[in-house]
Image (tube, rainbow, N blue to C red):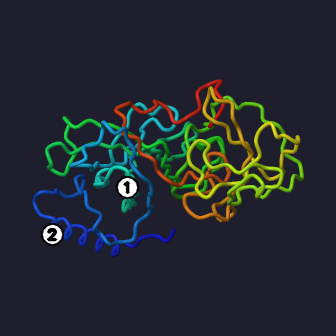
């Protein structure tokens, strides 16, 4: 990522200030900015949708506000989530959204590992602006959270410091949860060393498109356009070399072998497919799903001790 010059950042701040003035007094600036009219270059863009049970949605006012909430306790202890100023955005239920992030999380929002490495990990939180003042007030609780984790890595992390349990490059990452944090108990996984002839990760409509594999349309979320995977245990006993095992959340024992990867380009599929750095596997996890259901988020981004990973 190219560095942003002091002059460029100053110009961006000036432009954002002008946008706030034009927006009028109803929307305050900074922490309460809710319209993405700023036309600068975002540092990172989140794409997704907000879902909710029907009784949570007012058909005459089907909008919700999202904010980025950073965990001060890192991945393992996510019981204190702090909003990042300037990340409030107005969205609509059941419609796709793009949420552009223009600012880095401040150093106070990053977590320091025992070795001194630093990273930030966040969820999106959703609330409804009951009084229409364009900001979140104390009387307006968060009613839902994203099912993914947003990770900001200023300097590359080793596997021992990374919240995913595997090395993470510097940059922004959107990963699935729960994560195999370094302290998580890792279940025994069979060895994948076969030559099975399955086009892992390729789009499909039926099982016959996948050789000895199966065409999966829905597994821990929707697989848009289908994907050729190998169930575990495989019917013919062949586990393909260059694959990793994706398990369903406990207590569901369903699991599939998916295409292994290092970067998203290895996957050869369009959004929402990506190389999920939680597993280093190709899966449709690049879409942020914010579930508005009135429940509190998990107190940890990590796999519970003794439970198999997602």
Residue at 84% over, 40% down:
235
For the residue labelled by badge 2, is the local secondary structure a helix, a strand or a loop? helix
Residue holding disc 1: 95
- Left or right, 81 with respect to 259, comes to left
- Left or right, 255 with respect to 241, comes to left
Q: Which of marks 2 and 1 is nearer the N terminus?
A: 2
Residue 245 disc label: none
Q: Which of 295 and 123 is in front in this view?
A: 295
For the residue labelled by badge 1, is the local secondary structure a helix, a strand or a loop? loop
Residue at 60% over, 46% down:
218
Q: In which quarter of the image is the C terminus?
A: top right
Q: Residues within 10 Å of mark 2 (few under 14, many from 20)?
A: few
Distance of label 2 from label 1 (alpha carbons): 26 Å
Residue holding disc 2: 22
Residue 181, position in %: x, y? 61, 36
Q: Which of 152 and 139 is in front in this view?
A: 139
């Amino acid at each position: 990522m190219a560095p942003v010059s002091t002059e460029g950042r100053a110009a961006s701040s000036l432009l954002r200030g002008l946008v706030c003035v034009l927006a009028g007094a109803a929307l305050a600036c900074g922490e309460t900015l809710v319209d993405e009219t700023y036309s600068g270059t975002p540092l990172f863009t989140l794409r997704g949708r907000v879902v909710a049970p029907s009784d949570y949605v007012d058909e005459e006012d089907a909008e919700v506000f999202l904010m980025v909430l950073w965990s001060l306790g890192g991945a393992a202890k996510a019981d204190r989530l702090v909003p990042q100023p300037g990340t409030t955005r107005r969205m609509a239920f059941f419609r796709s959204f793009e949420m552009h992030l223009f600012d880095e999380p401040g150093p106070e929002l990053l977590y320091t590992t025992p070795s001194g490495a630093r990273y930030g990990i966040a969820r999106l939180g959703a609330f409804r602006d009951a009084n229409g003042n364009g900001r979140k007030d104390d009387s307006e609780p968060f009613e839902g959270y994203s099912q993914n984790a947003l990770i900001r890595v200023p300097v590359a992390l080793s596997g021992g410091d990374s919240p995913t349990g595997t090395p993470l490059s510097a940059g922004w990452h959107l990963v699935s949860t729960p994560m195999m944090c370094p302290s998580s108990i890792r279940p025994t996984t069979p060895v994948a060393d076969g030559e099975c002839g399955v086009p892992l990760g390729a789009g499909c409509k039926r099982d016959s498109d996948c050789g000895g594999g199966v065409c999966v349309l829905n597994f821990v979320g929707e697989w848009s356009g289908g994907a050729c995977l190998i169930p575990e245990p495989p019917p013919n006993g062949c586990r393909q070399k260059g694959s990793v095992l994706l398990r369903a959340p406990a207590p569901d024992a369903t699991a599939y072998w998916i295409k292994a990867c290092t970067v998203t380009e290895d996957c050869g599929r369009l959004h929402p497919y990506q190389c999920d750095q939680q597993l280093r596997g190709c899966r449709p996890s690049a879409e942020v799903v914010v579930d508005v259901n009135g429940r509190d988020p998990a107190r940890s981004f990590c796999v519970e001790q003794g439970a198999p990973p997602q």
